[in-house]
Amino acid sequence: MAHWAILSGIEGNLAAYEAVLADIKRLRQTVTELFILGDVIGLQGNNEGVVARLRSPQPGELIPQVCTGWWEEQALSLYGLRGLPDAPELRASQGQGAVKHLWDDLSRETVQWLNSLSFGFFELDCLLIHGSTVSYDDALTPETPVMVMCDRIMRANANNLFCGRSGQTFEYHLRSGSIPSTVTTLDQATDQEGQSLQPWQVVGVGCVGRPGQPPTYTLYNPGSNQVTFKTVTPAGVRGFGRSPAQPRR
């Protein structure tokens, strides 16, 4: 049956991305879609190479569908195309060195391509996004409170939410039920019809370019709703694991 390959967080690490592509080719499962949930650029040395590779896949390779992540938002802010000018979030999180690196490392053509990316993808009953519908910076994890996770999935209006912001691989299942609500006035409290909950899940898809760790990505079967996490062995990632220019956020 057809599967989707879903990944995030290349962060300029072309060697790690090539290793993931090679691993996908070795799979017994048939992969029909490749989704990349943001953070294709970063501080690991080859942003232009990664973007060129995404824009020009080799013959027979899947055409990746790429959405905006935290690093793309910082670049667009730095170039005055989105959000606050001069990337204050990047400056506060990573320091002036990261700001200069990103400014010097990206061509105008690459910045324009980053500006054309979607905020996320809605396929079948799945929302695929870097953070959540609240923000690209919304990092969902297994420790996220249940009520917060319910809010995010209800905002998504989907049965499955795939996200990449945290860099973790996880499945967070929300069973069917309801959330009661009460309206309180000066006179009395009145129970209202609650919000019904369907069997939903939130999936963290992993991170390709995390320094010092093997790349991880996710396989998803939309027919059976099965999620499988994949880890690329270090032997398949030549040159992977060198330190980035700045500490990871």
Image: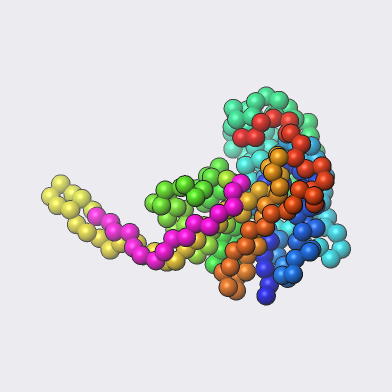
| Residue 84 percent coordinates (x, y) | 59, 33
Q: Residue drawn at (36%, 65%), measured in percent from left and top?
A: 177
Instruction: Specify whether residue 131 is painted magenta.
Output: no
Placement of 84 over or under 137, stated as above or below: above
The one of 18 and 115 positioned closer to us in this rendering: 18
Quadrant of the rendered image containing residue 76: top right
| Residue 73 percent coordinates (x, y) | 64, 41
Query: How would you classify the magenta stretch by its main secondary structure?
Result: strand
The one of 73 and 137 positioned closer to us in this rendering: 137
The one of 154 and 148 positioned closer to us in this rendering: 148
How many discs mark residues in the rendered view? 0
Query: Is 143 situated left or right of 111 in this image?
Result: left
Chain part drawn in magenta: 167-182
Q: Residue drawn at (68%, 37%), measured in percent from left and top?
A: 75
Query: Is 199 situated left or right of 223 in this image?
Result: left
- Using the rendered image of the protein, determine whether residue 135 is visible from the camera's viewpoint: no
| Residue 244 percent coordinates (x, y) | 73, 34
The one of 159 and 144 positioned closer to us in this rendering: 144
Q: In which quarter of the image is the N terminus?
A: bottom right
| Residue 51 percent coordinates (x, y) | 78, 47
- Using the rendered image of the protein, determine whether residue 245 is visible from the camera's viewpoint: yes
Q: Quadrant of the C terminus?
A: top right
Placement of 163 over or under 1, stated as above or below: above
